[in-house]
Amino acid sequence: MKQFIKYIILFILPIVVIALPLEYMMRQVPNPYKYKYEWMELNARDVETVVLGSSHAFYGVRPEFLDGKAFNMANVSQDIAHDLYLLKYWDKDYSALKRVILPISYFTLFANLKDGAEEYRCRYYKMYMDSDDYPAISFDNIELGNMKTARRKIKKMLKHDDNPGYDEYGWGNVYVLSQKDSVSWNDGSEAAAAVARHDADNLGNHADDNCAMLRDMALYCKQRDVRFILVTTPCWHSYTSALDKEQLKQMYQLICSLKEDFGVEYFDYLDDGRFVEEDFFDSNHLSDIGAAKFTRILNKDIQSAADF
């Protein structure tokens, strides 16, 4: 038995010797979760506008074009549960918070990150954003726990790629127009795939839980005299024309109830004709050019509503 244990140790030891420094190096690779957490730790007291939400906000809302001190706390596939967590995390620090901006997209009401295809992203809230919603001891708490994402980070390190994929305001800056896939854009294949991914049945339909959490966020803001601003970002007609009307209806019904019960503000740009092809990176995400244009329009509408 002792000999067996000895062999096991000899087998595991080299793996540990390699894995520990590799895990440490991977955690030093810039990522939006770590950056945003550290930024808020330093600036939560002074921030006036917090942008939450999924990739529609991460790539679509550029805080540099919003009035006052604003920061983008959105992340790819971020769901309502994590929005709520991030909003409340710095509750004791807020002293200047005036606005919370949250995108409500076709899929928002029905999605749950833990249940989705990108469940692996949950680990980042544990590793980099102090979430205690996951087991303390788990492979999900280490970068090497998911070899697909680990390989991407290792390649990034080997290439000495120092582009973090976001700017100083937390905006995701990699959806540049010059990198647009014109083939999938022109044949509509990307739009069809996106609509299918965003269908409520394919997302597991978590509407009841998400409705409750949205109402919690609305109440939180109302009690603190903070404007809770819901936004539906622009999408291209190849995407919007294929959306299920009943799912859209459910989204709009929820928004109406939040407006009536909590005085929530809502700006709908889903089919806004002011946005042209160059404003989009794909059928449901804005390009860098479109994000600047959209944020300027949004900022103006937010200020106009405040003056009304």
Image (cartoon, rainbow, N blue to C red):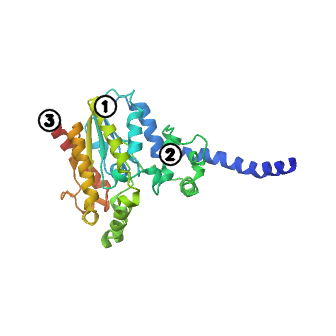
Query: Quarter of the image holding residue 135?
Result: top right
| Among the two numbered marks 2 and 3 on one chain, the one whose residue lies closer to the N terminus | 2
Residue 132 placement, left or right of 188: right
Say if 196 sits above or below 132 in the image.
below
**Between discs 1 and 3, the one toward the N terminus:** 1
* Residue, far front: 208
Q: Nearer the viewer, residue 127 or 29?
A: 127
- Residue closer to the observer: 307 or 131: 131
| Mark identifier at residue 97 | 1
Q: What residue would you read off at disc 2?
A: 124
Q: Position of residue 30 (x, y in %)?
A: 49, 46
Residue 247: image location, x then y, percent:
29, 58
Q: Secondary structure at mark 1?
A: loop
Circle 3 sits in a helix, a strand or a loop, which is it?
Answer: helix
Q: CA distance from mark 2 to mark 1?
A: 25 Å
Q: Is residue 123 left or right of residue 107?
A: right
Would you say residue 233 is visible in this rendering?
Answer: no
Q: CA distance from mark 1 to mark 3?
A: 18 Å
The residue at the far left in this view is 308
Q: Are marks 2 and 3 in contact (CB under 8 Å)?
A: no
The kind of residue tagged 3 is Asp
The x and y percentages for residue 22 are: 63, 48
Outermost residue toward the bottom in this view: 187
Which label sits on residue 273?
Answer: none
At x 36% / y 56%, what residue is drawn? Answer: 175
Residue 16 shows in this picture? yes
Amino acid type of the residue tagged 2 in the rendering = Tyr
The residue pinned by badge 3 equals 307
